[in-house]
Amino acid sequence: MSEIKIRLATRADKASLLRLIDAHADFENMERPTEAAREGIMRHGFGDHRRFSAFLASLDGEDVGYAITYEGYASFLGRPTLYLEDIFVYEKARGKGFGGTMFKFLAEEAVDRGCVRMEWIVVDWNENAIGFYERRGAVQLSEWHTYRLEEPELKALVSGA
């Protein structure tokens, strides 16, 4: 049986992490990170002021998946929330228990940090992921809508334009 190991990524894992992020972007039909974005990932994930945690999963010694998390805060509950930004595994490693192992690991991480919940967003076309999460007890929130301001709109708002 294959052995899945999960570890906190370090700066030394840069090449492996960026390859996984590229593969995830390809899967989502999105553009891969630019060189500036790659530098930002390294600075924000492994610099003096860390903004996220990255975890790598290896299968028989090969990095095959990753997750990126950060903490938010549930002000009405007075407790942190673990936010799952990304979770991905190479196609060749799917069906070998990575998803369940990583998801359980992240749930344990949330509990260990004293988080009151774990949250994430799933694209509506990824029925496999939706089924995976729902089989583990996750519920889709219908009363909350995701909104976004991208950088140009942020700058326009700040400048009063």
Image (spheres, rainbow, N blue to C red):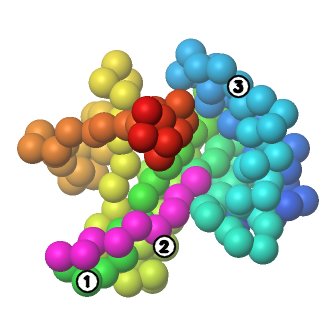
Disc 2 residue type? Answer: Glu
Read off the magenta span. Answer: 68-76
92 relative to 41, above or below: above
Q: Position of residue 101 (x, y in %)?
A: 50, 56
Rounded to the nearest angstrom, the CA distance separating label 2 from label 3 is 28 Å
Question: Is 71 a magenta residue?
Answer: yes
Using the image as rendered, state which of residue 33 and residue 106 is in the foreground: 33
Which badge, 3 or 1, is on the more N-terminal residue? 3
Q: Position of residue 48 (x, y in %)?
A: 78, 74
In the drawing, does residue 53 fall left or right of residue 74? right
Rounded to the nearest angstrom, the CA distance separating label 2 from label 1 is 18 Å
Q: Which residue is mark 1?
A: 78
The C terminus, quarter of image: top left
Q: Which mark is residue 134?
A: none
Question: Is 128 a magenta residue?
Answer: no
Q: Which residue is mark 2?
A: 109
Quarter location, residue 89: top right
Quarter location, residue 107: bottom left
Which badge, 2 or 1, is on the more N-terminal residue? 1
Label the magenta part by its dominant secondary structure.
Answer: strand
Circles 3 and 1 in contact, beta carbons < 8 Å: no
Badge 3 density bin: few <14, some 14–19, many ≥20, Cα 10 Å = some
Disc 1 residue type? Answer: Gly
